[in-house]
Image (cartoon, rainbow, N blue to C red):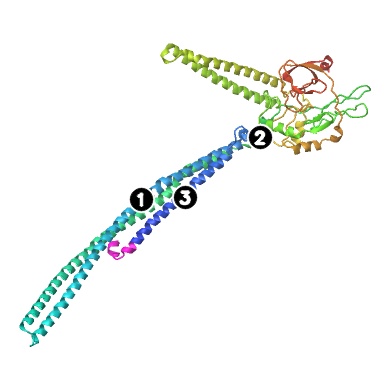
Amino acid sequence: MSWGSELWDQFDNLEKHTQSGIEFVERYSKFVKERSDIEISYAKQIRNLSKKYQPKKNSREEEENKYTSCRAFLSTLNELNDYAGQHEVIAENLTSQIITELSRYLTELKAERKSHFHDGRKAQQQIESLWKQLESSKRRFERDCKEADRAQQYFERMDADINVTKADVEKARQQAQMRHQIAADSKTEYSNYLTKFNQEQNEHYYTLIPNIFQKLQEMEERRIERVGVSMKTYAEVDREVLPIVGKCLDGMTKAAESIEPKTDSKQVVESYKSGFEPPGDVEFEDYGPGQTMKRTVSETSLSNSRGEAKERPGGGKSKGKLWPFIKNKNKLSLKLITFNSHVRNLIEGSGPEDFSHLPPEQRRKKLQAKIDDINKDIQKEMDQKDALTKMKGVYEKNPQMGDPASVDPRLVEMAMNIEKLQSEVQKFEGWLAEVEGRLPSRSDPPRRQSGLYESQNSNSTMVDNNCAQDRESPDGSYTEEQSSETQVKVAIANTPEFDDEFDDGDEETLPTIGTCKAVYSFEGHNEGTISVTEGELLFVIEQDKGDGWTRIRRNEEEEGYVPTSYVEVFLETNTKDS
C-alpha cells in the first residue's frame, strides 16, 4: 500500500511520524549504549573481585597454593577474570556494531528526511502560489465584468434621455464598449490561469506528492529494517561469547572436580611433619640416702615445673624457667609483647640462615629447597658465562665485531658469583647433612622428645598450622608458637603449680657439664638464646637433646641456648659415661 495514493493529504502527519521514527532510533541507540556501559562496569567489578582474592606474594595465601582446594580457587579466579573479559567483548561489539553504525545512519537519515520534506514544501508552495494567481485573476475578472455592466447601464440611460447631447451619448457608448473589452480580456486571463492551475494541481497530487511520499515510505521502511538488524545484532553479540563463557564455566567446574581431600591431607603431613619420634617411657628412679634425684624436664605441658622442683636450703624450691617468661632481677616479667613480635617475625619468614628455628623435618625441606634454588642460580650464571665465552671467541676471530677485552670484566664477575654460590651450596649441604644425620629412623627406639608437640596438638591450643615454627624453649622443649596473648595465658593458667613455681627468688644455678668453643658467631635475638662470637670459650650446662640446641653459660648472669652446629662441645668424662 502506497503512501502517495492513500496519504496524499497527510503531509503534516507524515512529517510527525517520520520524526518520531528518528527519535525511536535515537532512544534505542541510547539503550544499547547504557547496556554497554553496564557491561564495562560489570567487567571491571568482576576483574577487581578476582584481583582482590588473588594470593599475595610472599604471604600465607601463596604458601597455601600447594593444596588442591586453594589451587582450584585460584583457577576459578583466573576463569572469572576471563569471564569478565567476555563482558568487555560484549561492550566493545555493542559499541562498534550497533552504537557507531546507528549514529552514522541517524545522520544520513535526518539529511534524507530533510531533503524529501524540503521538496514537498517547495511543491506545496508552488501550488499555493498558482492558487493565489487564480484567485487574483478571478477577482479581477469579476471586477471588470461589474464595471462593464455599470458602463452599459450608464450608456442606456444617456441614450434614453432626450436632453443629453449626441456627443455625450457617443462618449458613453464608447466607454461601455471599452469596459466590455476589458472584461473579455479578464475572462480570457482567468480561463488561462484556471487551466494552468488545474494542470499543476493534477501534477502536484498525482505525480509530485506521490513521488515524495513514496521516497519517505522507502526511507521509513529502511529505518525499520535497520532497527530490526540492530536488534538481531544485539542478540548475536551475546550469542558469540557464549562458547567462551561456557569454557570459563567448564574450567571452574574442572577446577572444583580437581580438589582431592586425601592429597591435601597428605600435603599437611609433608608441610608440618617435625621428624621427631613420640616420647618414650620415663624410667623409674629410686631414691637413696645422700643421692640426688635427677632433674627431668616435663614434656607434656608448657611449663617444666613438674620434676624440676627441688628443695633448696631453708625449705624453698628452686624455680626453673618457664619460656616465654624471663626473670628480671627480683621480678618475673611476662614478655607477651616480645613473644608476639617474635611470632610475627617467624611468620613473615625471618629466622636463622640455617633454619635452625624449625623442626628437623621442616628444616631439611627448607635447606633442600634452598640448595635447589642456589643450584638453579649457578646453572644460570654458568650458561651466561658460556655464552660470553663464545662471544669472546667470536670477537677474537673477528676483531671488527668487538673488543674481546671488553668481555673479561663480566667473565671475572660471573666466575666470582659462581664461586660464591658454590660456597653457599656447600654451607647449606653441610647443614643438610647434619639434619639428615639427626633425623631418627623408623627402626630406632622411641626417645623422649618434646612432649609439647603432643600437648598442643591434642588440646588444640595451636592456633594456626601455617605459623612458622619457633626455636626450642630454654627448658629444652621444642615449642610451636602461639599466635595470641590469650592462648599463652590459657596455657599458663592450665599449668599446675604455676603460682607455687614462681616467686621473686633467684633460680638455681645448673652445674657445669663441660666446655665448648664457638665455631661460628651467633646473634641471639630471640628470648632464651645467647649471643656468641667465633672462637669464644664457654661452659656447657645442658646437652643437645636431639632438638639442635645446646644450653651454655658465659658467667653467673649470662646463659642461654645456641645452635649445636655453631659450637664444638667438650664434655667432662663422667658426663660422657652417664
Q: Quadrant of residue 479?
A: top right
| Rendering coords of residue 86 (x, y %) | 48, 43
Tell me residue 45's x, y (percent).
Answer: 54, 44
Image location (x, y in percent) of residue 90: 46, 45
Residue 148 within the segment the image draws in magenta: no
Which residue range is magenta in the image? 1-14
Nearer the observer, disc 3 or disc 2?
3
The reply to whether callout 3 and callout 1 are in contact (CB within 8 Å) is: no
Which label sits on residue 105? 1
Q: Is residue 228 visible?
A: yes
Mark 3 surroundings: few (<14), some (14-19) or many (≥20) residues within 10 A? some
Q: Which of marks 3 and 2 is nearer the N terminus?
A: 3
Q: How far apart are marks 1 and 2 (CA)?
A: 64 Å
In the image, residue 433 sits, relative to residue 68, either above or below, namely above
Q: Mark 2 = which residue?
A: 265
Under mark 3, the amino acid is Arg
Q: Identify the residue position indicated by label 3 in the image.
A: 35
Separation (CA) of disc 3 from disc 1: 20 Å
> Going 69% across and 21% down the picture, which residue do you hit?
436
Q: Earlier in the sequence, mark 3 or mark 1?
A: 3
Residue 159, image x, y percentages = 8, 84
Q: Which amino acid does label 2 sit on?
A: Ser
Q: Residue 441 carries which label?
A: none
> At 35% from the left edge and 51% from the top edge, which residue is drawn?
107
Q: Which residue lies furthest to the top in this view?
A: 397
- Nearest to viewer (mark 1 / mark 2): 1
Count all numbered tags in the image, as a single digit: 3
Q: As rendered, which of 486 and 402 lies closer to the eye?
A: 402
Instruction: Please give the name of the residue rendered at 47% of the width and 50% of the height, measured from the top-left corner.
Output: 35
